């Protein structure tokens, strides 16, 4: 067995190029968290196909033993690892790894099927060398384990449509630019919060 490769550029990961994929999935790692939503009306068959594809996407990351979150639009989800949105995307049943998070050049592609077949070296190289997008969260300064987790309304019963942020320990709201996260703090007068 080869020496494990440690990637320290952005992520504190150890990936073994000869990882044993013969173990049952539940013995390798838990399934990634999926926090997706549907942004448009979908045909029931298309919705079922997308859910199947996203399940296989989650299985891929589980097989690697990497904790990620799948967030955003169910059709074009973002893959979040720690404080970064990974430079990859799904198209049909392919996971496409790129060199940059914004319209990057394709480096490697995996077919998301039941029996996943792929090489580890291109994935390890991608983790180490691609430019992954930094993400931001808003947290309460005095209670750093509480983040903006979403939004609610003052009173739906009386028709008040004033939104306000809701805080929680889990599933923080993700912002793709520091500027937008700062604007949210200003809009909602969250002087007791900070962008991290």
Image (cartoon, rainbow, N blue to C red):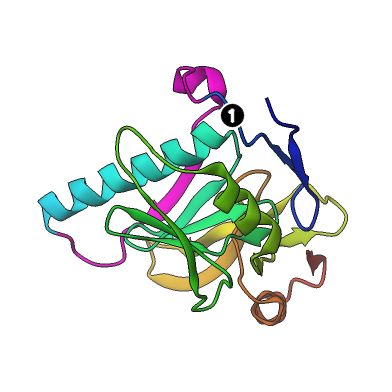
Residue 191 in the image, given as x and y percentages of width and height: 81, 72
Q: Is residue 148 visible?
A: no
Q: Quadrant of residue 89?
A: bottom left
As drawn, 69 above or below 26: below
Q: At x 49% / y 17%, what residue is drawn?
A: 23
Q: Secondary structure at mark 1?
A: loop
Name the residue nearer the viewer: 119 or 99.
Answer: 119
Query: Which residues, given as a range, are shown in magenta?
Result: 21-42
| Residue denoted by label 1 | 19
Name the residue nearer the viewer: 190 or 158.
Answer: 190
* Residue, far right: 142
Question: Is residue 182 toward the left or the right of residue 95 in the image?
Answer: right
Q: Is residue 40 visible?
A: yes
Pick the quarter of the image with the C terminus.
Answer: bottom right
Residue 110 in the image, given as x and y percentages of width and height: 40, 51
As drawn, 51 above or below 164: above
Name the residue nearer the viewer: 23 or 2.
Answer: 2
């Amino acid at each position: 067995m080869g020496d494990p490769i440690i990637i320290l550029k952005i992520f504190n990961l150890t990936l073994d190029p000869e990882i044993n994929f013969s173990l049952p999935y539940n013995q390798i790692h838990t399934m990634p968290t999926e926090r997706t939503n549907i942004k448009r009306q979908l045909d029931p068959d298309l919705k079922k196909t997308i859910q199947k594809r996203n399940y296989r996407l989650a299985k891929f990351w589980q097989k690697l033993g990497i904790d990620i979150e799948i967030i955003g639009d169910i059709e074009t989800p973002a893959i979040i690892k720690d404080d970064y949105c990974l430079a990859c995307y799904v198209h049909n049943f392919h996971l496409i790894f790129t060199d940059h998070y914004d319209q990057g050049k394709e480096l490697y592609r995996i077919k998301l099927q039941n029996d996943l077949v792929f090489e580890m070296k291109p994935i390890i190289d991608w983790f180490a060398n691609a430019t992954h997008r930094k993400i931001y969260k808003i947290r309460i300064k005095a209670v750093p384990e509480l983040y903006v987790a979403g939004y609610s309304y003052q009173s739906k019963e009386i028709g008040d449509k004033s939104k306000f942020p809701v805080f929680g320990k889990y599933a923080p709201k993700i912002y793709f630019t520091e500027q937008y996260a700062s604007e949210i703090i200003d809009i909602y007068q969250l002087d007791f919060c900070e962008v991290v």
